[in-house]
Image (spheres, rainbow, N blue to C red):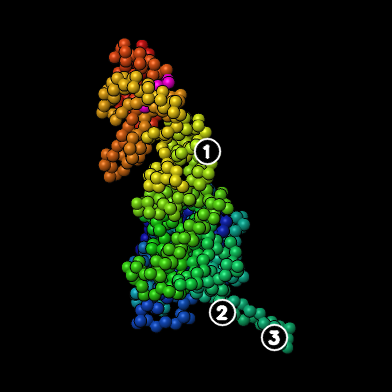
Amino acid sequence: MAQKEFKAESKRLLEMMVNSIYSQKEIFLRELISNASDAIDKMYYRTLTDESLSFNQDDFYIKVTADKEARTLTIVDTGIGMNEAELEENLGTIARSGSLAFKQQNEAKDGHDIIGQFGVGFYSAFMVADRVTVVTKSADSSQAFRWESNGTDGYTIEPTDYDAVGSTITLHLKENQEDAEESFDEYLDEQRLKQIIKKYSDFIRYPIKMDVTKYEQQEDSEETVETIEEETINSMVPIWRKNKSELTDADYENFYQEKRYGFDKPLAYEHIHVDGTIRYNSILYIPETTPFDFYSKDFEKGLELYSSGVLIMEKCPDLLPDYFSFVKGMVDSEDLSLNISREILQHDRQLQMIAKNIKSKIKSQLKKMLKNDREHYEKFFEAFGRQLKYGVYSDFGQNKEDLQDLLLFHSSKEKKLVSLADYVEAMPEEQEFIYYATGSSIDRMEKLPQAELVKDKGFELLYFTEDVDEFAIKMMREYQGKEFKSIASGDLNLESEEEKKEAEESASENKELFDEMKSLLADKVKDVRISTRLKSHPVCLTAEGEVTIEMEKILQQMPDNQGVKADKVLEINYSHEVFNSLKQTFDQDKETFKLYTNLLYNQALLIEGLPIEDPVAFTNDVSKLMK
Ligand SMILES: Nc1ncnc2c1ncn2[C@@H]1O[C@H](COP(=O)(O)OP(=O)(O)OP(=O)(O)O)[C@@H](O)[C@H]1O
């Protein structure tokens, strides 16, 4: 029989698994039971919806058997099974292609325990076993197959005999290691197995059976008689049907992990029972960390959808708006039909009502967290805040009202994240606008010449570091009647009447000078004018109109870049001594005036983080100054 190699990625993951010193090896059982339960879910659904199949509740179960002599642990399920191609596909490779890269990346950072951060799945069996055998027959095939592997040299697949549809996974447990204080015997121990099943898999909806030893005292003698009885170990009541008061944080955490909603811990959860015009139970989770593929096109949002306890869809996208796509969890409703197709489901009124209800629950949960548990909220926002900002921006801003109070931005004054409500509340009476700066880092924005005057007035500035920030804010236009104002565009309205008059006078006095500069920079800027926003710096670039310089930078990087440009304005600080030199050269030395104009323009580009069009010419210009 030919031995097949694991795919390269799987091989590396297996090595990690086999050599793992991960402390909680017991979770392998949770993973295998969870797979068994998923397989039964599929079979259960099929027998309920296919009239040619007969339905018998007792047909659906998982059985765990330990054989001390053979040192094997067996997990039998009556699920949907796998055919040869599925065996190959599912157990010879790893489904999620990006996952290994992510694991490796994080392994370096976090050391050995990283394996525990992932849904280790089927391969976790190799943490405790040195050989794993899977015998399985698919519901769609008359031939059964046997897959076997020692976890290192690849695997074999061969046809075999197996009566029923379903799978049997046999783990040949590793030898105990004397020096490593590791004993794999514990996974043969009845009590220990019961304890692990109770701990992690109590809410599995199908019976998890075990042959349990019972001791019975004989009536008329001292002797006890040992009998073996099959017992269901788990309580089987799905967690979502239980009362919140019966459940602990650990129960919700276990469910999250058992369901592999994420590889981390949930940051927050919400258990919802609704019993009115719509009826449903739901458990929703906010993960602690951003899934590695979250901001990629491969990420699929959605909640598990059950109809009266039967799983009908693994990821129902219609239950979550895009901006809450990070939410994980499930919904179970009696009001949905089992046979509903994906297309019809989308238009189902009940489902739409549930989705609406869930949306508002998530929103209020987040608001509550923001108000009562800022530390957690900031953690959440760090992981998923960008998605909320996209939410404000997308769909032509129709969700901005829903989301605006969930946003946080860095504040120049507070040196931490503030909400828009915090900002507005702290605004001095005379402050008209919500000021913001955009840039690649806070450090850079702190030093922006345009920021000086705003800060000098005692006004707070919001620092936007993410591409989406300014687009989102432009969509909002205002918050609580206060307009957003970029410090690098338009009129900031900061100067007093007197200052305004002075600036106007200087502008008309120096009209020719500015006209000359403008014509020298004709293809580069739309205007050159006196600045009312500068204090200690001689120049800056600003933008007129809707597109700011930062937006131009972002739009230029987009694949479908349509060459959108900001209308740039070179602003000159007329109180700066550089302006006096400029005036002098304008009157006496046109060549130097041209040189200064170019230098000032290029300085302004540098401050904005924009590339200098001709760096050689620029350095030549600087050299000329030194002569
Ligand atoms: N007992 C089983 N019966 C039928 N199919 C199974 C069984 N166990 C595993 N599989 C199949 O093998 C696949 C791989 O399982 P594995 O546990 O490695 O990952 P997963 O469950 O898909 O995802 P995760 O990475 O979240 O664990 C499953 O998706 C399923 O299709």
Residue for badge 1? 428
* Labels 1, 2: front one: 1
Question: Magenta: predominant secondary structure element?
Answer: loop
Any magenta on residue 575? Answer: yes
Q: Which residues are magenta?
A: 571-576
Q: Label 2 sits on what residue type?
A: Glu
Disc 1 residue type (three-letter):
Pro
Q: Is residue 12 above or below residue 257?
A: above
The mark nearer the N terminus, 3 or 1, is 3
Q: Residue at x 33, y 14 (%)?
A: 585
Instruction: Return the residue at label 2.
Output: 230
Residue marked by disc 3: 218
Residue 374, position as x, y percentages in the image: 56, 49
Residue 468 shows in the view: no
**Image quadrant for the N terminus?**
bottom left
* Frontmost residue, 305 versus 159: 305
